[in-house]
Image (tube, grey):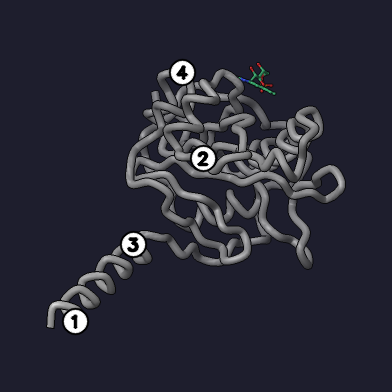
Amino acid sequence: MKTTTLCAGLLMVSATVLAQNIQLPAPQKSGGKPLMEALSQRQSAREFDAKALSEQTLSNLLWAAFGFNRDGKRTAPSANNRQEFEVYAALEKGLYLYNAKDNALELVKSEDLRAKTGRQGFTSVAPLNLIYAYDTKKMPDEKMAYADCGFISQNVYLYCASEGLATVVRGAVDKDGLAQAMGLKSGYAVALAQTVGYPKTK
Ligand SMILES: Cc1cc2nc3c(=O)[nH]c(=O)nc-3n(C[C@H](O)[C@H](O)[C@H](O)COP(=O)(O)O)c2cc1C
């Protein structure tokens, strides 16, 4: 009897945990501004509105950042195709890991870590802070890792320019403190963070 109750309890707990993962809608891979217009509008912003991003926007944005666009390959290049980066999304409701294969956000922590993703006050106003962390075993060369990170970040810049969103990539991050707060896996390192949201309405 006790075992049955325990099993039922465990099932309920695991269902709750699974339910907290977010299955994103399929990314929309057409539309947006022509490339030359997006490039004309690419810029950094440091003032954000608190309005949340829809799941469709998150899906499109994350796919643009580092989704798969061919068999096993991504929207951003990586040295020797190491694909060493993981993209984390710090949202008000928690920290999530982008699972590009399943187009899902996997809950890492039910804690608002936005303020810990940087040293600038707007990080806790904007609805989303992306954290780019990489597997140092897959890519031991830090310079190559940072080059790879730049491509992911620029994809986000261009998506934001295309969609009228505000963004800024950030190196001013307490990387060790953030890694600790995230419970980042051993052997992974934070490279850069990037804030995304709607432009602040004056
Ligand atoms: C690697 C890197 C790190 C950066 N770190 C920060 C940062 O910590 N905080 C910030 O506000 N902007 C940061 N920026 C944004 C730059 O300040 C910005 O790109 C630059 O001023 C040019 O402005 P623009 O992006 O609007 O052309 C960073 C940019 C890069 C490429």
Q: Position of residue 176 (x, y in %)?
A: 53, 25
**Residue at mark 4 to residue at mark 3: CA–CA distance:** 32 Å
Residue 17 disc label: 3
**2 or 3: mark nearer the eye:** 2
Whether residue 8 can be seen here:
yes
Query: Which of the 4 image quarters holds residue 113?
Result: top left
Residue at which label 4 appears: 120
Residue farthest toward the left in the current orientation of the protein: 1
Q: Mark 1 packing: few (<14 Cα in 10 Å), some, or many (20+)?
A: few
Residue at which label 2 appears: 184
**Disc 2 element:** loop
Q: Position of residue 18 (x, y in %)?
A: 37, 65
- Indicate whether 198 appears above or below 121: below
Q: Mark 4 packing: few (<14 Cα in 10 Å), some, or many (20+)?
A: few
**2 or 1: mark nearer the eye:** 1
Residue at which label 1 appears: 4
State whether label 1 is within 8 Å of ligand 1: no
Inspect the image, locate mark 4, and give the three-letter code of the amino acid beneath it: Gln
Inspect the image, locate mark 2, and give the three-letter code of the amino acid beneath it: Leu
State whether label 4 is within 8 Å of ligand 1: yes
Residue contact between numbered discs 3 and 1, judged by CB atoms under 8 Å: no
Quadrant location of the N terminus? Answer: bottom left
Between 138 and 162, which is closer to the camera in this rendering?
A: 138
Inspect the image, locate mark 1, and give the three-letter code of the amino acid beneath it: Thr
Q: Position of residue 122 (x, y in %)?
A: 42, 23
Between 93 and 176, which is closer to the camera in this rendering?
A: 176
Residue contact between numbered discs 2 and 3, judged by CB atoms under 8 Å: no
Residue contact between numbered discs 2 and 1, judged by CB atoms under 8 Å: no
**Disc 1 element:** helix
Between 171 and 183, which is closer to the camera in this rendering?
A: 183
Q: Quadrant of ligand 1?
A: top right
